[in-house]
Image (cartoon, rainbow, N blue to C red):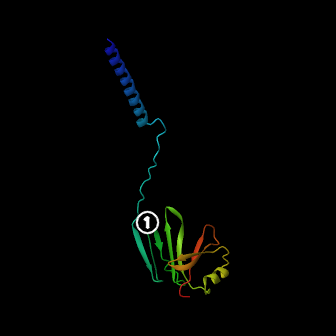
């Protein structure tokens, strides 16, 4: 009889220990804490590009959805190319024209650009400054004088 009680006691202890371990594992796998959220970001879509090669010796690519106006009516400047898009305000203008400035520093002084900063444009030294119109940025370089 004593052996029977010892055997039943061992089974009860093992059952309680096994049940406690199972309950502990269930709490860990289902996560008692907050579940981390993962932000799903859509992959960017790439628009097909067009290429513009200008007689003034510069080339660039632009999305097909953008409208390019080469301003052929402009007979004064070497280039006057304007990019616009229906879904974006503003525009980008490429102007190639003569300047009386011999260097970028001369250009900054003549144009009264007090906050021009150094940058590059097409691998050439350039100046970036704010234009006189609101929300206008000017990027200027001097090539071949």
Image position of 74 (left or right of 44): right
Query: Between residues 131 and 12, which one lies in front from this camera angle?
Result: 12
Q: Position of residue 36 (x, y in %)?
A: 47, 43
Residue in front for this viewpoint, 104 or 33: 33
Instruction: Give the answer, above or below, for where 118 lies relative to 8.
Output: below
Which residue occupies 45% across, 47% down?
Answer: 38
Q: Residue furthest front?
A: 2
Q: Position of residue 78 (x, y in %)?
A: 51, 84
The residue shown at (38%, 30%) is 22
The percent coordinates of residue 17 (x first, y second) are 39, 26
Task: Write down the residue under mark 1.
Answer: 65
Q: Residue at x 61, y 82 (%)?
A: 104
Vertical side of 69 occupied by 8: above or below: above
**Frontmost residue, 58 versus 134:** 58
- What residue is rendered at 43% in x and 65% in y? 65
Quarter of the figure with the N terminus: top left
| Residue toward you, 31 or 3 | 3
Q: Is residue 70 left or right of residue 99?
A: left
Q: Helix, strand, or loop for circle 1? A: loop
In the rendered structure, the answer to whether residue 132 lies left or right of residue 62 reads right
Give the image quarter of residue 44: bottom left
């Amino acid at each position: 009889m004593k052996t029977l009680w010892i055997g039943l006691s061992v089974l009860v202890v093992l059952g309680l220990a096994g049940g406690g371990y199972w309950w502990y594992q269930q709490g860990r796998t289902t996560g008692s804490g907050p579940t981390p959220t993962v932000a799903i970001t859509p992959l960017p879509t790439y628009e097909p590009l067009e290429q513009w090669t200008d007689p003034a010796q510069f080339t660039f690519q632009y999305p097909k959805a953008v409208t390019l106006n080469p301003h052929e009516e402009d007979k004064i400047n070497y280039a006057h190319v304007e990019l616009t898009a229906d879904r974006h305000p503003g525009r980008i203008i490429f102007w190639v024209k003569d300047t009386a400035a011999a260097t970028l520093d001369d250009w900054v002084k003549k144009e009264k650009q007090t906050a021009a900063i150094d940058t590059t444009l097409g691998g050439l030294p350039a100046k970036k400054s704010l234009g006189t119109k609101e929300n206008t940025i000017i990027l200027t370089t001097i090539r071949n004088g």
